[in-house]
């Protein structure tokens, strides 16, 4: 065959799919059209659109601000911009906000990272073949490395 669909609601998105053929659109947040894919079953619901619009219209009826505002979108976009800069520079990049509305001074949140081989563990994911994919950060240089190890 040219592919397989496997439902497993206890792992990732609940749906695992493998395809060798390019079939076009898979899902909004799908990373590729071939190979292992983990599409979301109900994109509109899972991505929050239903909840967001329900709250927005209810807020209009009640004369209040919605749970998520344009300012929230501004902050999210500033974070995404820092992510793009980080991908380009291969280092941690600061979030640049011209309009920061948190109480001043804002205490810095610090959680000691889990260390693997002296590097901070950013993310660990179990691959379909059982191996572990680890994304690690050198805390001194900011360099990001990817390692795949036996699970």
Image (cartoon, rainbow, N blue to C red):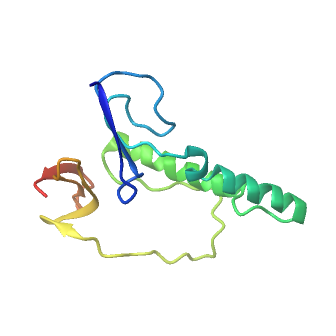
- Please say whether residue 70 is visible from this viewpoint: no
- Please say whether residue 65 is visible from this viewpoint: yes
Residue 101: x, y in percent?
66, 67
Q: Residue at x 76, y 61 (%)?
A: 66
Residue 11: x, y in percent?
35, 57
Left or right: residue 36 compared with residue 69: left
Left or right: residue 102 compared with residue 87: right
Using the rendered view, name the quadrant where residue 16 is placed: top left
Left or right: residue 54 compared with residue 84: right
On screen, 6 above or below 20?
below
On screen, 44 above or below 139?
above
Q: Residue at x 61, y 76 (%)?
A: 104
Q: Nearer the viewer, residue 120 or 95?
A: 120
On screen, 128 above or below 71?
above
Q: Nearer the viewer, residue 119 or 130?
A: 130
Q: Residue furthest front?
A: 1
Picture quarter with the N terminus: top left
Left or right: residue 139 compared with residue 73: left
Picture quarter with the C terminus: bottom left
Total number of numbered labels?
0
On screen, 40 above or below 31?
below
Q: Residue at x 37, y 60 (%)?
A: 10
Residue 111: x, y in percent?
35, 75
Residue 113: x, y in percent?
28, 71
């Amino acid at each position: 065959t040219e592919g397989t669909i496997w439902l497993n609601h206890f792992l990732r998105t609940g749906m695992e799919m493998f395809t060798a053929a390019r079939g076009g659109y898979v899902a909004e947040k799908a990373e590729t059209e071939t190979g292992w894919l983990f599409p979301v079953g109900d994109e509109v619901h899972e991505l929050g659109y239903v909840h967001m619009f329900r709250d927005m219209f209810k807020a209009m009826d009640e004369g209040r601000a919605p749970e998520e505002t344009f300012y929230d979108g501004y902050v999210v976009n500033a974070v995404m911009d820092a992510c793009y800069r980080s991908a380009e520079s291969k280092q941690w990049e600061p979030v640049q906000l011209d309009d920061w509305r948190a109480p001043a001074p804002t205490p810095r949140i610090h959680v000691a990272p889990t260390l693997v081989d002296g590097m901070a563990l950013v993310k660990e994911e179990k691959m379909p073949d059982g191996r572990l994919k680890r994304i690690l950060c050198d805390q001194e240089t900011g360099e990001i490395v990817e390692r795949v190890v036996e699970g």
